[in-house]
Image (cartoon, grey):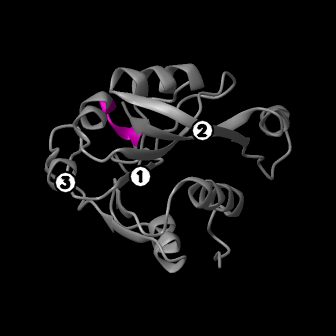
Amino acid sequence: MYKDNYPKKRYKLTLDFVDQHISKEDEILDLGIINPLSKLLNQRGYKVTNTQGEDLDINFDSVEKSNAKVISAFEILEHLVAPYNILSKIKAKKLIASVPLRLWFAKAYRNIKDPRDRHFHEFEDWQFDWLLEKAGWEIKARKKWTNPAKKIGFRPILRLFTPRYYIVYAEKN
């Protein structure tokens, strides 16, 4: 099911979390362009469509016009300058979203070669919870997990014990 270059642990835990909280009958609008995770969800029987690469900080048409019952936002909200704006515009009553957590021992992620591939935010769990609450969402379930690095050193050892990813299932108040 997973290709060798997919983050197997993250995808498996994300798919298991989706299976626990989302019905395959519910249409899903995934924020972000088609990606390996949205493809895996489709292969698993979910009805997933994606946004088209528009700037979700200023263009909310995709969520305002969508009739999807669920919005998913896997590893995208940290790239937005103001994720509150799109979260507050969502009409769907269900949200499943994951973000990388801030690591005290590492700087925020930044790909120098691709200006779109950087994190404006790396949240602590309470900050992400607060953001969702302020945008009108009530968290019903949450999960965290680590992302061990296959390297030697102090930071790779810390990654064995420090949660890196956070996923929530929330419903609109």
Q: Distance between the residues labelled 3 and 2?
A: 25 Å
Closest to the observer: 39 or 159?
39
Provide residue 146's location: percent of width, then percent of height: 74, 42
Closest to the observer: 30 or 103?
30
Query: Can you say which quadrant of the picture contains the C terminus?
Result: top left
Could you tell me which secondary element the residue under label 2 belongs to?
strand
Closest to the observer: 49 or 93?
93
Residue drawn 51% across and 79% down? 43
> According to the image, label 1 marks what residue?
72
Mark 1 belongs to which amino acid? Ser
Mark 2 belongs to which amino acid? Ala
Along the polypeptide, which appears first: circle 3 or circle 1? 3
Q: Of tags 3 and 2, which is closer to the observer?
A: 2
Provide residue 130's location: percent of width, then percent of height: 46, 20
Provide residue 104's location: percent of width, then percent of height: 66, 21
> According to the image, label 3 marks what residue?
62
Q: Distance between the residues labelled 1 and 2?
A: 14 Å
Residue drawn 32% across and 32% down? 83
Mark 3 belongs to which amino acid? Ser
Would residue 81 be visible to someone looking at this image? no
Q: Of tags 1 and 2, which is closer to the observer?
A: 2
Along the polypeptide, which appears first: circle 1 or circle 2? 1
CB under 8 Å between discs 3 and 1: no
> According to the image, label 2 marks what residue?
141
Is 79 inside the magenta-drawn segment? yes
Residue drawn 46% across and 71% down? 46
Closest to the observer: 49 or 101?
49
Could you tell me which secondary element the residue under label 1 belongs to?
strand
Whether residue 160 is situated above or below residue 114 in the rendered picture: above
What residue span does the magenta drawing correspond to?
A: 77-83
Tell me if 79 is positioned left or right of 57 in this view. right
Along the polypeptide, which appears first: circle 3 or circle 2? 3
